[in-house]
């Protein structure tokens, strides 16, 4: 019987929780012993009583929570203080910030079996475990609402006795999961939407949602998508053409939402200061890549500010602003992932390192760090 610990998150602005009463019931049904730290669900409006009714017990603090815990399920990575309290050999599954987390090697030194939820393979079989997609979907939706909070006009066209209000023009930069949800949300709210992505394959998806695809002409068949489905860094010539095209469309936009990220690298600059200078008074930029440096150099992490009539919104953890649903989806992703390792009869832990999903997400086990390239990046 595996003992599973669900801590209260301590990172700034983190309101999500890695399990819900629904997933706790399923862990218990599998034969697991689940312990939840008091207050763990408060940010997502889940009471301690709801966790108890689902079959978990409660711990007063992190130290008593992880004492003798075999598995620790989290949202954010373990910090230094938490790491010291978790027992050697424990299984840790969480977001790990694999390209920037300086503690990865320390997790290995502590003897943890550490799973990085960001590195779950993007395959059909792993879709139900893909936390990046589930959380990006939420972020794309909320990004549009954040833009509206600071945009001083209507989104849809309105014809009234006092006159006609034109619909807002929205430019979405990046048509991954977050971008596509942002497109769908802005369209539902009545905006005219354009979307840009370096991957030509995104065109069909963008147009199916009723948006116009902004495409940089290419002289060759260079593939802008890597094997994992992420955008790759493009050539200098492409970037020059891209900058000119973006500047042209940005000058006409009322709202710009940027989502472009390249794993392991700083976010590409898409909206330059020169481009911002050409934008309309009252325009809004929501920079969803702000935690990786931002797609606009004027964006500031966890800040909203205005320069020359353009408002920059730099919320770094957008899913946490919709904590109830974000937690529910993350918890289901986590349950599906852990189900690969939990014996359906006894609830005992059995890690099959031959499984491709486990292989892809396993950072360290039995004192061996399995993704050494991550440590070369300074982790």
Image: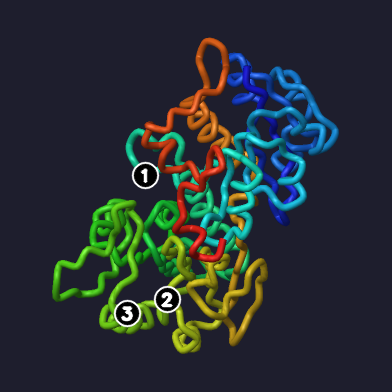
Which callout, 1 or 2, points at the residue further toward the start of the chain? 1
Q: Residue 264: horizontal and vertical position, in percent?
A: 46, 63
Task: Tell me where residue 354 appears, x and y as whole percent.
Answer: 37, 32
Residue shown at the point (50%, 76%) measured from the top left: 296
Frontmost residue, 346 versus 334: 346
Colour setting: rainbow
How far separated are the C-alphas under marks 3 and 2? 9 Å
- For label 2, the crowd category at 10 Å Cα-Cα, with few meaning under 14, some 14 to 19 and many 20 or more, is some
The residue pinned by badge 1 equals: 122
Q: Earlier in the sequence, mark 3 or mark 1?
A: 1
Nearer to me, 128 or 309: 128
The residue positioned farthest toward the left in the image shown: 220
Looking at the rendered image, the disc whose residue lies closer to the viewer, 1 or 2, is 1
Instruction: Please tell me whether residue 255 is drawn above or below residue 156 in the rendered image.
Output: below
Asked if disc 3 and disc 1 are in contact, CB closer than 8 Å, the reply is no
**Residue 132, position as x, y percentages in the image:** 48, 48
Mark 2 lies on a secondary structure that is: loop
Quadrant of the snapshot with the N terminus? top right
**Residue 111 falls left or right of residue 341:** right
Q: CA distance from mark 1 to mark 2?
A: 26 Å
| In the depicted structure, whether residue 108 falls above or below residue 301 | above
- Seen in the image, is 226 located left or right of residue 1? left
Q: Nearer the viewer, mark 3 or mark 1?
A: 1
Q: Quadrant of residue 75?
A: top right
Residue 160 makes an appearance in the image? no
Please report the residue visible at 36 percent of the width from the left and 78 percent of the height from the top: 246
Q: Nearer the viewer, residue 307 or 315?
A: 315
What residue is pinned by disc 2? 270
Q: Which mark is residue 239?
A: 3
Secondary structure under tag 1 reads loop
């Amino acid at each position: 019987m595996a003992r599973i610990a669900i801590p209260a998150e301590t990172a700034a602005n983190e309101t999500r929780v890695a399990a819900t009463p629904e997933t706790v019931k399923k862990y218990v049904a599998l034969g697991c012993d689940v312990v939840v730290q008091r207050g763990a669900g408060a940010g997502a409006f889940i009471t301690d009583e709801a966790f108890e009714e689902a079959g978990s017990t409660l711990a007063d603090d992190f130290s008593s929570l992880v004492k003798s815990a075999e598995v620790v399920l989290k949202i954010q990575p373990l910090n230094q203080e938490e790491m010291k309290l978790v027992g050697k050999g424990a299984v840790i599954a969480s977001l790990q910030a694999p390209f920037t987390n300086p503690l990865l090697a320390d997790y290995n030194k502590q003897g943890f079996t550490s799973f990085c939820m960001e590195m779950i393979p993007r395959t059909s079989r792993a879709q139900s475990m893909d936390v990046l997609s589930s959380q990006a979907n939420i972020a794309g939706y909320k990004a549009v609402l954040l833009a509206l909070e600071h945009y001083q006009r209507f989104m849809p066209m309105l014809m009234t006795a006092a006159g006609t209000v034109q619909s807002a023009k929205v430019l979405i930069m990046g048509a991954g999961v977050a971008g596509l949800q942002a497109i769908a949300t802005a369209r539902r709210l009545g905006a005219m939407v354009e979307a840009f992505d370096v991957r030509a394959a995104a065109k069909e998806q963008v147009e199916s949602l009723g948006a116009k695809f902004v495409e940089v002409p290419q002289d060759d068949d260079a593939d802008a998508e890597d094997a994992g489905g992420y955008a790759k860094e493009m050539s200098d010539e492409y970037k020059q053409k891209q900058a000119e095209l973006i500047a042209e469309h940005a000058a006409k936009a009322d709202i710009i939402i940027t989502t472009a990220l390249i794993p392991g690298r700083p976010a590409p600059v898409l909206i330059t200061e020169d481009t911002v200078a050409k934008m309309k008074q009252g325009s809004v930029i929501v920079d969803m890549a702000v935690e990786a440096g931002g797609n606009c150099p004027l964006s500031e992490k966890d800040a909203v500010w205005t320069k020359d009539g353009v408002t920059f919104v730099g919320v770094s953890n957008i899913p946490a602003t919709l904590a109830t649903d974000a937690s529910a989806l993350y918890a289901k992703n986590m349950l599906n992932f852990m189900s690969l390792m939990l014996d359906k009869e006894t609830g005992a832990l059995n890690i099959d390192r031959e499984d491709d999903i486990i292989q892809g997400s396993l950072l360290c086990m039995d004192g061996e760090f399995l993704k050494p390239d991550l440590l070369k990046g300074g982790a």
